[in-house]
Image: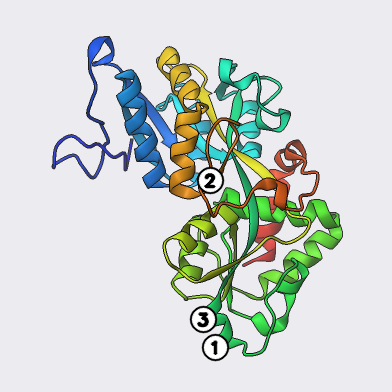
Amino acid sequence: MKRIKLLATAALSAALVVFSGCSGKNKNEVLHVYSIIHEEETEALCNLFTEKTGIKVEYLRATTGELVNRIISEKNAPQADALLGGASNYHINLSKEGCLESYSSPLAKNLPDYAKSDDNTWTGFCVLTLGIGVNKVRFAEKFPGAEYPVTWEDLLNPLFDDEIVMTNPVASSTAYLFVQNQLQRLGWDAGWEYLSSLSQLVGQFPDSGSAPPKLIGTGEYALGVAYLHALSKYNAQGFDIQLVAPKDSVGDVDCVSIMKNTKNLKAAQKFVDFILSAEAETLMSSIDFTIPVNKDAIAPAGAIPVSEISLIDYDAKLASSQKDEVIRKWTELVK
């Protein structure tokens, strides 16, 4: 497993991660995790899981597209036991490909319907919502006297040419969710007209969903599309970012799932139970400002509650079924 991190010896520290505190009957047990969420959150959660269970964790952190393709190619001989993170439509696709194991955690029974699949192949552990980030200083320098964009349509202002950053939907679940946001709120044809117009104004399409908040926060771009929780995190770190939650946005969940044919099924099930726990979701929210799905978990001050955001009735199954067609059309659109 390339680029897996192992906190064991200095020689292996760049490739693998094995967390300390392992003891008891599980001391020789190792869980392999593919992670789409950020490195800091992945390490903190895996470390706490090891502390709680004694099960060692090795993980690979990569982009959504890279890990989804890897899981599909490995489905007959999975190299990982669990997938941590990624919007629901990616897990739906993996389930259709026969890559995921059905498991209904006891902690999933009280979750809202949007946070769990009908076939129990994935479960949501935090809520994701999109918004617009504005670097106040750069915006004032570039567009003196201009008003901040407050709707998705406001981003189409020609004034903002080359000052917008958003991720590449071919590689990033963040950007694919944004593309579906426009297609589902406007309709197929009008949605593509919007995306075509916006793409001409975007200065950069990085692959990672973590890139736009950083590029906005450090002032390399005045505007960007990103998850609101990621923008909130940079605000809490002292970057002067204005958060905008446009009307008719989308909400989805980051999910956790188990690989079909895993040889570590019990350990993987324990990992799912752990990720859905209030303790784990509180830990994750304290780091990245996501909104926990578990009602007993605590979100930090500065996180924007879902109740304060105008959301469309997002159809995750439709987003999943359209994935290949949408990516093909996007690739033709943005060359």
Q: Quadrant of the C terminus?
A: bottom right
Which one is earlier in the sequence, the residue at label 2 or at label 3?
2
What residue does disc 1 label?
A: 141
Q: Would you say the residues marked 2 and 3 are in contact, meaning their CB atoms lie under 8 Å apart? A: no
- State the SS at label 1: helix
Q: Residues within 10 Å of mark 1 (few under 14, many from 20)?
A: few
Which one is earlier in the sequence, the residue at label 2 or at label 1?
2
Would residue 280 be seen by someone viewing this image from the given angle? yes
Three-letter residue code for mark 3 = Val
In the rendered image, the residue lying farthest to the front is 301
What residue does disc 2 label?
A: 65
Q: Which mark is residue 160?
A: none
Q: In the shown orientation, is residue 224 left or right of residue 82?
A: right
Q: Residue at x 38, y 46 (%)?
A: 39
C-alpha gap between disc 1 and disc 3: 6 Å
- Please tell me in which quadrant of the rendered image residue 168 appears: bottom right
Mark count: 3
Q: Residue at x 23, y 25 (%)?
A: 21
Q: Would you say the residues marked 1 and 3 are in contact, meaning their CB atoms lie under 8 Å apart? A: yes
The front one of 176 and 241 is 241
Residue 139: percent from the left, percent from the top?
57, 81
Front position among marks 2 and 1? 1
Three-letter residue code for mark 1 = Glu
Q: Residue at x 40, y 31 (%)?
A: 33
Q: Would you say the residues marked 2 and 1 are in contact, meaning their CB atoms lie under 8 Å apart? A: no
Would residue 36 be seen by someone viewing this image from the given angle? no
Q: In the shown orientation, is residue 179 left or right of residue 211?
A: right
Q: Quadrant of the N terminus?
A: top left
What residue does disc 3 label?
A: 137
Residue 222: percent from the left, percent from the top?
56, 76
In the rendered image, the residue lying farthest to the top is 25
Q: In the shown orientation, is residue 314 left or right of residue 270?
A: right
